[in-house]
Image (tube, rainbow, N blue to C red):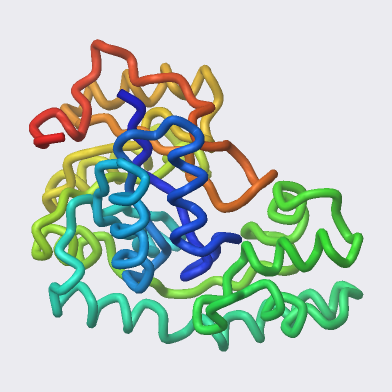
């Protein structure tokens, strides 16, 4: 079964509307699909209806931004209740600082000789309240500063680079608690993206499990083949359930729906007890 439990629409930093993402997922052969917009639940109703029309089983999801030991991490929540007030109010608090952070990023890019970044990023944000690094990356490509969004992140939008501005997101315990309180399961998103030592990663997993987290993404568009094996081994070692998702953001922006290999059959999938 083709299961994709991580992607984004233009309700957060994706390029396509939820209904368009659903159609693209269906064309890619996806049978079980989750929309996991950053810190946003606003696209789920449209996505749910579109998934039904395409014959896909839909999973309500979200991806929560977390600050842990000074680093930004992401925790995916799956099978959440979008009507849960505690989750919704928590996400409002997480979203509240995005505009000021974007202005600071634009000031730093201006200091690096790149003008008009704030307005440029907003042009790519269908939901201005959710302006993010991805929108700045698209602006940098549009302006001819870099060749693609991956290069934009690598050269400008990660810690230590001129367009990066730190921000205090949710705590790990709060993010996992909101997800669990909304009836969902918490999954560490794309762990291979984080610049964590082996010891720090082990500490993260320990704290995550203590908070009630249960899963880790193993097969994702952000991981190499070697990382599929590495994080599969970590899932076994720490007793975590394994998840799979493209992290699709838009055409020509990373992995496409249906392009990833299945999970290793020796792993316990996060969906093992779901009725699909």
Residue at position x 16%, y 34% from top? 276
The residue that appears at 11% across and 58% down in the rendered structure is: 180
Rendered view: 186 above or below 92: above
Question: Could you tell me residue 238's position as x and y percent?
Answer: 20, 28
Residue 135, horizontal then vertical, whole percent = 65, 68
Residue under the image location 32 percent in, 18 percent down:
233
Task: Place residue 137 in its image quadrant.
Answer: bottom right
235 versus 105 height, above or below: above
Q: Nearer the viewer, residue 271 or 166?
A: 271
Judged from this view, the residue extending furthest toward the front is 53
* Image coords of residue 5 (percent x, y): 34, 42
The reply to whether residue 199 is visible in this rendering is: no
Percent x, y for residue 13?
54, 64
Q: Is residue 118 visible?
A: yes
Q: Quadrant of residue 270?
A: top left
- 25 sits to left or right of 212: right
Question: Which residue: 39% across, 34% down?
Answer: 30
Q: Quadrant of the N terminus?
A: top left
The total of numbered circles placed on residues is: 0
Looking at the image, residue 52 sits to the left or right of residue 65; the answer is left
Residue that lies at the very extreme toward the top in this rendered image: 266
Q: Is residue 37 left or right of residue 92?
A: right
Q: Is residue 209 above or below residue 122?
A: above
162 sits to left or right of 211: right
Q: Nearer the viewer, residue 17 or 91?
A: 17
């Amino acid at each position: 079964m083709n299961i994709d439990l991580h992607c984004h629409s233009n309700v957060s930093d994706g390029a396509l509307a939820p209904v368009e993402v659903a159609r693209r997922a269906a064309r890619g052969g996806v049978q079980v699909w989750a929309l996991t917009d950053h810190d946003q639940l606003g696209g789920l109703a449209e996505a749910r209806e579109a998934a039904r029309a395409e014959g896909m089983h839909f999973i309500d999801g979200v991806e929560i931004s977390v600050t842990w030991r000074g680093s930004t991490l992401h925790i995916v929540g799956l099978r959440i209740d979008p009507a849960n007030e505690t989750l919704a109010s928590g996400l409002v608090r997480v979203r509240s600082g995005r505009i000021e952070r974007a202005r600071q990023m634009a000031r730093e890019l201006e200091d690096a000789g790149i003008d008009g970044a704030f307005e440029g990023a907003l042009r790519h944000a269908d939901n201005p309240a959710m302006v993010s690094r991805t929108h700045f990356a698209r602006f940098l490509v549009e302006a001819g500063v870099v060749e693609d969004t991956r290069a934009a992140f690598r050269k400008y939008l990660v810690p230590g680079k001129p367009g990066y501005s730190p921000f205090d997101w949710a705590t790990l315990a709060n993010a996992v608690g909101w997800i669990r309180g909304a009836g969902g399961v918490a999954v560490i998103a794309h762990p291979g993206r984080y610049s964590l030592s082996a010891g720090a990663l082990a500490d993260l997993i320990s704290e995550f499990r203590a908070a009630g987290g249960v899963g880790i993404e193993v097969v994702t568009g952000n991981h190499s083949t070697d990382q599929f094996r590495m994080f599969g081994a970590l899932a076994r070692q720490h007793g975590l359930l394994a998840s799979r998702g493209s992290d699709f953001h838009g055409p020509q922006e990373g992995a496409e729906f249906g392009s990833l290999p299945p999970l290793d059959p020796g792993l316990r999938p996060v969906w093992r007890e779901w009725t699909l």
